[in-house]
Structures are given as structure tokens and as C-alpha cells.
Image (spheres, rainbow, N blue to C red):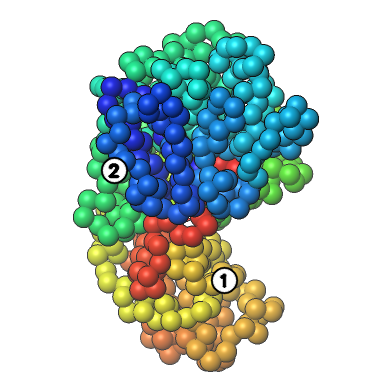
Amino acid sequence: MCGIVGYIGKEKALPKVLSGLKFLEYRGYDSAGVAYIYDNEIKITKEVGRINSLEKLLDLSIPSNIAIGHTRWATHGEVNIINSHPHKVGKFTVVHNGIIENYLKIKEKLQKEGIIFKSSTDTEVIPALLDYYYQKENNILKAIVKTINELEGSFALGIICDDDKNNLYAIRRGSPLIIAPSNDGIFIASDIPAILNYTNKYILLNENEIVKLSKNEYQIYDNKLNKIIKEIKIYEGSQDDAMLNGYDHYMLKEIHEEEKVFLDTFNYYVENNKFKDTMPNFKKYQNIHIVACGSAYYVGCIAKSLIENYANIPVYASVASEYRYQKNFYDQNTLVIIISQSGETADSLEALRKAKNDGIDTLAIVNVAMSSIAREAKYTLYVKAGPEIAVATTKAFLAQTTLIALLTIKLQGQNDLLKEFIGLEKHIRELLNRNYQEYAKIISKSNNTFFIGRLVDYALCLEGSLKLKETSYINSVAIQAGELKHGTISLITDNTLVIGICTKKDISSKTISNLKEVKARKANIIYITNEFIEDNFYDQIILLPKVNDIVMPILTVIPLQLIAYEVAKIRGCDIDKPRNLAKSVTVE
Ligand code: F6R
């Protein structure tokens, strides 16, 4: 999704803004641009494609002390230089992350006033509206308030004005934005990695808070322009979190952090085989709705299996983009759980708000501290994955799965199963150190791959299939093993690749029967299991350690992630930034 970085201070702004933008590349983008003040003029440079291409157009040695930069992930209007940010109308230059839902109405109104628009973006109405109100108010802060009162949708904005070349303005609603004071100046940014090269101090802005920044100070206002003081937070991770540290890709680095992520998450909630106070009691809830998007939704599917089996509580797992519009049946004993790595996914956030509006208790399972979902939910449980930079989630998935297993035990009300976590990190390490090249080579040649499994294994099939699709662009389908013969089996012919996942002993014979059915159609089978059987229905086997079902999914996902990585590498794909994808989907 779009990324914003701005700097105002004593040092040269352009190198800092570009460095920050590079750390936001993981969010996904298709063009980039900067606006800076030099020679008492606002200059704008934009380019389609990577930040490196933009950098080539800029002279970084220019002594400009104010700059705002942007990476754009196109939503309204095609990918081209005109539609890239910053956008300037009249005296206002703006970078924007989010979507303005009522932009057509505003555009029409302003066109009637004689304002001419150059781009097809929703964003351009923002500087136009700022300029319109500034002409009436002659006061930048008042113009900002009037503008945001008229905007519907989500936005984080960095703003500079021709009439005030000593200040930079910022505001957020719905989209994330932080302010980060450093020794030589102050930053605005969409996310913490952008500023870690310069400072570990940051301030989280709440909805509709406005900031005016100058070289060495900042003032925050609410939307009535009352001054407010906010706590400065210290980012506790290290700068290394946002660095490759010798790995070829963030995806590989993050997968290799999974042993630590597992231990950090487990130890945050458990000590001496008992839950700590960090895990609240959810005993009163008799039915659970889990709502999330993409991989986080697949964690929700794992949760359904585990919670229903072990805690005997009915669980309905839904994707957030459906949940927010469908009819939901709940009562005062319903808990709505939102799972989200970023804590900013627009559909998940709206689903949370819908449940809250209906008076239902909500629990957020989130990685990014103090993100919108974390802040708005009644309860928040953090997973301890640390910053995840690669667009495709890996370590956050493992951390969420770990936390779901812990939550299941908490809901069950007995601590016995906590012992199943002890020593699991050794299995994680062993799986991380295996070589998956031979499987990756086979998969990289296939244009169509089928993942089949039942119940919790089906949830892992969904994740394995998504990971493969998004990183290596190989079409793949996940299907419940028993459902195959109701249609999809017609696609299975000579050498069709089928990956069967089977880790639940009580239903393994059923999945094996389904694999034999595809073998009879000459499929090529990779069998992923925790129980070796000598039979001839598979061509390759990945034998997983045998552990209790409650923790098994934590292990099963690891080969799926590493295989997807290896396949993407063989196929020369842009592993950390797959095409068309954004890390944090803050638009509907
Ligand atoms: C896939 C992936 C996405 C996210 C989804 C939800 O690898 O990363 O499917 O899981 O966009 O994002 P969060 O968890 O940030 O709400």
C-alpha cells in the first residue's frame, strides 16, 4: 500500500526521505515521488517504477531541509507520472495514503468553482480543497480542518504550502502515520522501519489529529485545533529488524526468525507451564467469530479446528470483506476475534467496528503494536513476530498460529497441553535447516498445483497454496480432499502436481484414499505427513516431526513457506515484493 515519509530539519532532506521510502518498499508500490523546498520554491519529481529510478532523477546533495515523499500503489487512475504523488493544486502540495470515497462529489463541486484537475486520482481533490479553503480562511490549520471535515474515507497526509516554507503539516484518519523526532529534525512516516536509520522515538497519531512540524519542534492539535501533548514512545526492536543481515531476501530472513518468534510469543504468555497475566480469561464466551483477510484468515481456519476440538466452543471463521456486509448472528456471549499482522487492514478494521457497533466484545490478535485494530478492540493479544518486511507473511503466520494454540488451551481451561510447547523450537529449527530444493524444482516446472487436505490440514493447504501463488505466480488451488471428486478431479491428468497434507491420524486413511484416487489418474504426488507409511501412492514425501495436534500446524507451515520461497527463487520472481501486492491493505 502507499507509503509516506517526510522530513523537516537541519540536515539535507532528500537522502533521508529516499532512505525512508526504501524501507517502505515492502508495502508494495508502482510509482514514487517527492516534493521538496529549494531556492524558495516547491519542486516535485515523480517516476513510475522503483525508487531507484526516482533517485536517478534527483540531486541528493541539494541543501533542501523540507521534503515529503511517497510510494503509490494505484487505486484510482492508472500507473503513470501524472497520477503519482505528490499532487499540487494552487498553493498546496500533498502526499496521501488511503482512499477518498466522496472524491467525485468534491471534484464536481470544485470544478464548478473553476478548479482544473490534471490526474484521475481521488487524491487530487485534497490539495484542491485545501487551496479552496485556504483562500477563504487565510490560515493553513483552519483550511486543513475544513478539508478533513469534508473528506470521507481514509487518509494519512503530508502537506506543504507555498506560503509557509518553514513548516510541514500532517494528519491521519484511518491510515497509519507516525511522527518521529530525531537529533537533527522531525520525520513523518507510514511505518517505523522508515525512520529507524535516524531515530527510535516515535509518536502515534490518533484519528483526526493534525501536526505542524518545524525544524526543531512540533505541535499536535485535535480537529478543533486545541493543542495536545502526546507521549513519545521508544521502539524497542533493533535497527537490524529492518535490515537483510546477509540474507538474500526478507522472506527468507523472516522464515529463519521463526524459532525465536515462536519462543518470544510463547514466553510472553506462559511461564513455568502456567499462563501469565498477559493472557486474559475468556471463559464467558460461548461462541466465537473469527474475522480476517488472506493468510490471517487461514490462521482463523486453523483456530476453528483447534478451538472446536479442544475447547468445545463453536467457531465461525469469515473473511473480513464478506463479514462486514453479511448478516451476522451473535449475542452477548459472542467474542469476535480479528486476526491481523499489520493491524491496519481496512476490511478487518471495519469488521471490528461493525461488531463493536453491535455491542459485541472484540479481541484483536495483532503483530504491530498500537495499530488501529490493536487500539480499537476491547482486548488485544500481541504476537511477538517483530517487523515483517516481506510482503508475503511468514513469521507472523507462525506467531499467530502459536498464539491461537495458546488461546485454545486458555479457552479449554486446563493447562496440561502447555507442555506440548516445550522443546518445539528444536523441531522448528530442524525444519528450517532442511533442504527443500528437490521439491521446489518439481513445483517450479508445474503450471498448476493442487493442495489437498482435510480440516486443519485443509487450512494449511490454503496457506501453502496462497504462498506459492503470490510469490512464484504458479496457479494453485487448495481443496478439501474429500471434495475433489465432486468436480475438480476432472483437472487431474498425467503428471498434474498434487500436494497432499495429512497430519491428523484419525482422518489420515481418508486423505490417503483421496490421494490414491488422484494417483490412479497419474498425478505426481508430494505427500506431507507426520506418519511414515510405506506405500506407492506418493512420489515424494516430506516427513514432519510427530507432535501433538495442538502444536502440529506450527510445524506444518514451515516447509510450505520454504518451498514457496525456493520456487519463487528458481523462477526469478521479485520475492519480497510480488507484483500487484501490498503489505498492508488499508483500502477496501
Ligand atoms: C499473504 C498475506 C496476506 C495478509 C492479508 C492480511 O502472504 O500476507 O494475505 O495475510 O493481507 O493482512 P493483515 O494480517 O495485515 O491483516
User: Where residue 322 appears, x then y in whole percent?
Assistant: 69, 49
Q: Residues within 10 Å of mark 1 (few under 14, many from 20)?
A: some
Looking at the picture, how far across and down is residue 128, in whole percent? 64, 29
The residue pinned by badge 1 equals: 477
Which residue matches tag 2?
241
Q: Earlier in the sequence, mark 2 or mark 1?
A: 2
The x, y position of residue 323, in whole percent, is 68, 46
Q: Residues within 10 Å of mark 2 (few under 14, many from 20)?
A: some
**Which residue is depicted at the point 38% across and 41% down?**
21
In the displayed structure, does residue 490 sit left or right of residue 391? right
Q: Is residue 435 left or right of residue 163?
A: left
Residue 384 in view (yes/no): no
User: 581 or 79: nearer the eye?
Assistant: 79
**Residue 290 point in image, percent of width and height:** 59, 45
Would you say 411 lies left or right of 313 here? left
Taking the view exactly as shown, the residue that stands out farthest to the front is 39
- Of residue 529 and residue 16, the one placed in the foreground of this image is 16
Location of residue 345 by image quarter:
top right
Identify the amino acid type marked 1: Val
What's the CA distance linking mark 2 and mark 1? Answer: 33 Å
Task: Say above or below: 539 vs 160.
Answer: below
Q: Is mark 2 within 8 Å of ligand 1?
A: no
* Label 2 element class: helix
Q: Is residue 528 above or below residue 28?
A: below
Asked whether the beta carbons under mark 2 and mark 1 sit within 8 Å of each other, the answer is no
- Quadrant housing residue 121: top right
Give me the residue at 62% from left, 17% from top: 134
Count of numbered circles on the image = 2
- Residue at the top extreme, as displayed: 226
Mark 2: which amino acid?
Asp
